[in-house]
Image (tube, rainbow, N blue to C red):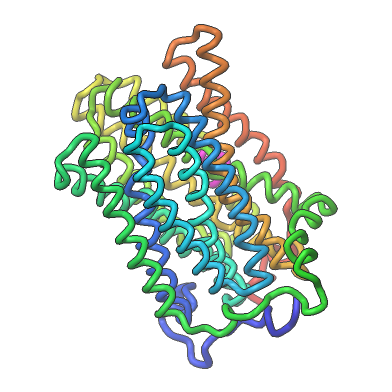
Amino acid sequence: MSAAATTPSTPQKEHFLDRIGIPSVLKWGFLGVLIFMTGLGVESNFLTPHLAKLLGSSEATIAVVIGFYSVAVLIASYLSGALSDLWGPRRVMLLGFIIWVVFEVAFLVAIQTGSLWLTGITYFLRGFGFPLFSFSFLVWINITTPVERNGTAVGWFYVMFTGGLPTLGSLVAIGAIPAFGGGAEGETGAMWLSIALVVVGFCIAWFGVKAENGNRRIAPAGESAGQVISSGIRLTLTNRKVLQGFLVRLINTAPEFGMFIILPAVISTTLEWGQARWLTMTVCVYAGNILFNAMFGAIGDRFGWRKTVQWCGIVGSALGLLLWWYVPHWVEPGSTWGFVLSTIAGVAFGIMLAGFVPMGAIMPALVPEHKGAAMAMYTTAAGGAYFLGSAVVAIVLNVTRALGMSSFASNSAVVWTFVALYACAFVMVNHLRVPQDEKGARHH
């Protein structure tokens, strides 16, 4: 990577935002990501039952459709880093925005035709949009922020990311669905509204951020386009630490996306709390995550990135996930006190999920001479978590139901599969030691 591309563009005089870990030159980009992801989050907690109802398909079939969508997210997440290396993050953000808006309109029209295939194709293509926008901005953060605040800056990115998807998005859905007539009609109206939010978010980031390092190539000038685009894959195949870091980040939020598929019907219908309470629960769960994302980034900067990921992120998330699944089944269905306890259990999962934030600082530190390629693999894993989460649900549900297992047993098998993946991550993260993470190195 060229020296020009790696030199943080920190203002000569630090502002309050710089001191708390948000590069002030990128401040409008953080806000833009928040609003953009709010638009994405509107549909996140009703899409599966919505599609099942309008297309006349089973949840297992819709899980397969979402699985294909997550493949697009996976590919685009890699390209967000690779293309940022090649063109600069700003242009990649524009590309992601255009793709999302065009294919969101096509997707909403396709749903109304009742065609499963047309809906699946447009949804798949839409999946290329948001990673190109959001994760290329994460690359921009990484090349702008001083290393001693890198973990905190990544934490603030995820405050905005999860603040929109699903937290504020769910709040918008709570108000928009009844405003547009309720039921499937109200859900459709809410999804059209989400386009306006995405446009506003993009405009704030596009016109608000003026940092010049986002307009230029990050990769060394001597590398061809093919070499730049393939560098992340080549690095992963030749560097075991990068591969393990990739897998840890891949596992990180996979359960989050998996629970978006199985929990909406369970909480709202099976356990009799209704859609509004399920959306309220989601807001609470990820509000907890938002509040602790920046904090865990700061904890990682202070006490160690790897230890924070291992004990807070992995162990804490595994325990929180089990609580979020089992507590709602242990309490009285439909009861207010049971809903409160179930929400608290979910909030525990959301808080501990923030313990993975320092992975965004660990990955580029593993190979400081190839930061762009490392970030390409990090963003691939971040988007790939959607793929892994939906794939686990699709595979486990179809296998267990073919074996005649009950709905509760099938869903429980999904949850325990995610716990097993966390156990694998616990082992792998032991190998992700980097010099910047030694005591005192980050404050030299």
Identify which residue is drawn at 66% across, 40% down. 426
Where is residue 354 drawn, in percent x and y? 48, 51
Identify which residue is drawn at 81% across, 73% down. 223
Residue 339, quarter of the rendered image:
top left
Q: Going by the image, does 437 lie left or right of 196?
A: right
Residue closer to the observer: 198 or 399: 198
Where is residue 260 drawn, in percent x and y? 41, 36
Residue closer to the observer: 182 or 415: 182
Q: Is residue 296 magenta?
A: no
Q: Is residue 316 magenta?
A: yes
Q: Going by the image, does 124 lie left or right of 274?
A: right
Quarter of the C terminus within the rendering: bottom right
- The secondary structure making up most of the magenta span is helix
Which residue reaches farthest top?
404
**Residue extent of the magenta highlight:** 313-317
Identify which residue is drawn at 64% across, 63% down. 81
Identify which residue is drawn at 54% across, 42% down. 70
Where is residue 222 drawn, in percent x and y? 82, 77
